[in-house]
Image (cartoon, rainbow, N blue to C red):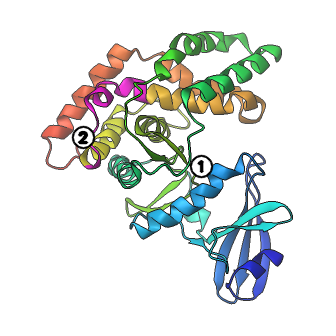
Amino acid sequence: MEILSHYSLGDLKTFTEHKRHPMFPKAYIVTTSKGKFFIKSFYEPPQQYFQLHGLDFSIFLEEKGIPSATIFKTKENKSWCWHKFKPYAVLEYIDYKENPDKILSLKESFEIGKILAKIHSCSQGFEFFKASYIYPNLYKSYMKGKEELILMNFPKKYQKALDWVDQNYYRMKVPLNLPKAICHEELGSQHCWFKNQSVYKIIDWDIGYNYMFYDLGTTLYFTCLHPKTKKISIPKMARVVYGYNLVRPLTQWEEDHIYECYLIGTLKYFSWILDNVGVWGYEKVFGPIIALQTLSSEEFNKKFYKEYSKLEQCKNPKTAK
């Protein structure tokens, strides 16, 4: 395999394609005389660059002691190589079967908040790559998806949810002086794996230099929304925020706007996948919106700050009930 000629990883023994969702780039599993590895392809320009910067950032984090998946460098000391006009990277092999997309426990929710804050703290002021997931770009994605949805004559039972999005999208705007750092953009159980309820590996860095508040919102969304029942877990949300706040203290504005933080994570993901509703299905796209729509900001805040205050008074917030 030509790609391996760029690396010092031994002689090829086996080569198989890793089955992934059809929307994702291809990945391969290879074994050589030196071990087992993933080889992953990336999108062509201009989409690829934030992902390729993510490879370098993953190496940076590993050097800082944050458990990111190992990226192997080429003989030229680069984090990726070109092959047939596409960039490829070699990563450590991790058995996906041992780390399924799981529902996090209360302790794991606390831990993911801490690890996200550590990532932000060590990269604050480190403008590795400008963010693409900011309000104007997300709003454009939403409007594009909405136009396509209307042309499809989508089921009218989702019209109320779409109207709610229209009425609340402005709440994604945040004060321009909020702190920024390198953001993972999708840190949840899909990309943050645990062993014995501690963070084991972080994968898939689609990074950007963005508001930490936006990134926290994404993690709240992926951690606190049950993937099947679409119920929002306030106890988990309180633990994510509490763990985060212990490492990187929130500004007063951030602490007072956790509802908006979760809303940002929800609308951000909704904007990403709306134009692919045919692939994901209406329930997956609109379910999280309906779940948030049925919980008023007043009710949300009452439940959240009550749970959060319990953690502040508790000696062991990891397991507090």
Which callout, 1 or 2, points at the residue further toward the start of the chain?
A: 1
Rendered location of residue 61, percent (x, y): 45, 63
Rendered location of residue 92, percent (x, y): 59, 72
Q: Is residue 155 left or right of residue 241?
A: right
Nearest the eye: 99 or 59: 59
Is residue 58 among what the camera can see?
Answer: yes
Q: Secondary structure at mark 2?
A: loop
Name the residue located 35 percent from the left edge and 21 percent from the top edge. Answer: 300
Q: In this figure, which residue is indicated by the disc labeled 2?
A: 321
Q: Is residue 121 magenta?
A: no
Residue type at the position of mark 2: Lys
Q: In this figure, which residue is indicated by the disc labeled 1?
A: 206
The span from disc 1 to disc 2 (Cα, nearest Å) is 34 Å
Q: Quadrant of residue 303?
A: top left
Name the residue located 70 percent from the left edge and 51 percent from the top edge. Answer: 48
Q: Is residue 203 left or right of residue 87?
A: left
Q: Quadrant of residue 71?
A: bottom right
Name the residue located 47 percent from the left edge and 25 percent from the top edge. Answer: 263
Q: Up-down: is 36 above or below 191?
A: below
Rendered location of residue 163, percent (x, y): 60, 9
- The residue mark sitting in front, 1 or 2, is 1
Q: What is the span of residues highlighted in magenta in the rendered image?
A: 247-261
Total numbered circles: 2
Q: Is residue 176 left or right of residue 37?
A: left
Nearest the eye: 110 or 57: 57
Q: Is residue 294 left or right of residue 46?
A: left
Q: Residues within 10 Å of mark 1 (few under 14, many from 20)?
A: many
Position of the C terminus by quadrant: top left
Magenta stretch, main secondary structure class: helix
Residue type at the position of mark 1: Asp
Name the residue located 56 percent from the left edge and 36 percent from the top edge. Answer: 228
